[in-house]
Image (cartoon, grey):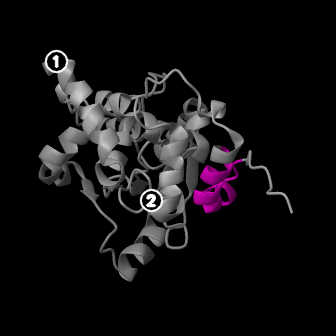
């Protein structure tokens, strides 16, 4: 998914689990839109009304060569990336239900039953579903499953390189979730030069932030190595250090 501002001539490529809800909310406000509901839900319900504000919402799945050429020539492009170790752990905490529904049916059914017993308030919460399923599927088992099955089944799991298409899009600025507060201030300065009059400069924190208290750093080294194997191109492309231990000769 992307947001493209014809009004201010900038392009934002969404990356799931990388502060995207926060960025979408800010961009809507820059165009005079106060969503009033979850920004993602607003986009799904009101995508047609965005054009009147000089903003468009779409997918790159069928983008033409002309689209990319115009984008690289005439728009300021930016996105946000995240350490692949943290991003994988976040998917385990908050999007495990999507993996389990495809590849771990026993854990999925057991977890959903536990969620059902928690009462109506928990039934519509995907995060709660993932929390329940995690009782029956360890982080190590989850990562080994990603190695077996691949990550193309859901865009939340895609590599950042697959999401951002750096070979097609010449990004002017790539923010990092780990330093998002400072990076947003830098982004604001760029956008002001494009004529954005409204930029919220105070830090309001990340919207839709994961609530997990445990760090992925507690994972065993074998699991860490597998995460590096899956997302090796992301580590290299975006300058993240690897905790991988080389296999013995």
Measured in 3D between alpha carbons, the distance from the residue under mark 2 to the one under mark 1, in whole angstroms, is 32 Å
Which label's residue is closer to the chain start, 2 or 1?
A: 1
Residue 96 seen in the current view = yes
Q: Residues within 10 Å of mark 1 (few under 14, many from 20)?
A: few
Residue under the point 55% across and 34% down: 180
Nearer-the-camera pick, 82 or 154: 154
Residue 71: where, in percent of width, then height?
42, 68
Residue 67: where, in percent of width, then height?
36, 75
Q: Is residue 26 left or right of residue 115?
A: right
Which region is colored magenta?
Answer: 224-240
Q: Are marks 2 and 1 in contact (CB under 8 Å)?
A: no
Nearer-the-camera pick, 16 or 99: 99
Q: Circle 2 — which element?
A: loop
Q: Circle 1 — which element?
A: loop
Residue 134: where, in percent of width, then height?
41, 33
* Residue 138 on the magenta span: no
Q: Residue furthest front?
A: 106
Residue 192: where, in percent of width, then height?
47, 42
* Residue 226 on the magenta span: yes
Residue under the point 48% across and 55% down: 146
Return the residue at label 1. Answer: 119
Mark closer to the observer (2, 1): 1
Q: Residues within 10 Å of mark 2 (few under 14, many from 20)?
A: some
Q: Which mark is residue 229?
A: none
- Of the 4 image quadrants, the one containing the N terminus is bottom left
Residue under the point 34% across and 28% down: 132
Return the residue at label 2. Answer: 151
Secondary structure mainly formed by the magenta segment: helix
């Amino acid at each position: 998914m992307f947001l493209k501002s014809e009004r201010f001539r900038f392009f934002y490529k969404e990356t799931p689990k990388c502060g995207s809800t926060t960025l979408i909310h800010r961009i809507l406000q820059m165009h005079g839109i106060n969503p009033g509901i979850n920004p993602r839900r607003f986009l799904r319900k009101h995508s047609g009304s965005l054009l009147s504000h000089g903003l468009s919402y779409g997918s790159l799945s069928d983008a033409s060569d002309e689209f990319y050429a115009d984008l690289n020539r005439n728009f300021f492009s930016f996105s946000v990336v995240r350490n692949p170790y943290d991003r994988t752990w976040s998917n385990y905490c908050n999007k495990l239900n999507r993996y389990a529904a495809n590849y771990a049916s026993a854990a999925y059914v057991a977890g959903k039953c536990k969620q059902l017993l928690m009462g109506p308030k928990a039934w519509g919460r995907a995060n709660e579903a993932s929390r329940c399923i995690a009782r029956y599927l360890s982080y190590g088992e989850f990562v080994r499953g990603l190695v077996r099955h691949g990550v193309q089944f859901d865009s939340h799991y895609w590599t950042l390189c697959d999401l951002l298409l750096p070979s097609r899009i010449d990004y002017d600025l790539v923010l990092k979730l780990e330093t998002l507060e400072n990076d947003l201030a830098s982004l604001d300065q760029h956008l002001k030069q494009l004529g954005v009059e409204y930029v919220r400069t105070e830090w309001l924190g990340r919207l839709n932030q994961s609530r997990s208290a445990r760090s992925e750093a507690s994972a065993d080294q074998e699991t860490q190595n597998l995460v590096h194997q899956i997302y090796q191109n992301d580590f290299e492309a975006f300058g993240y250090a690897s905790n991988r231990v080389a296999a013995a000769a």
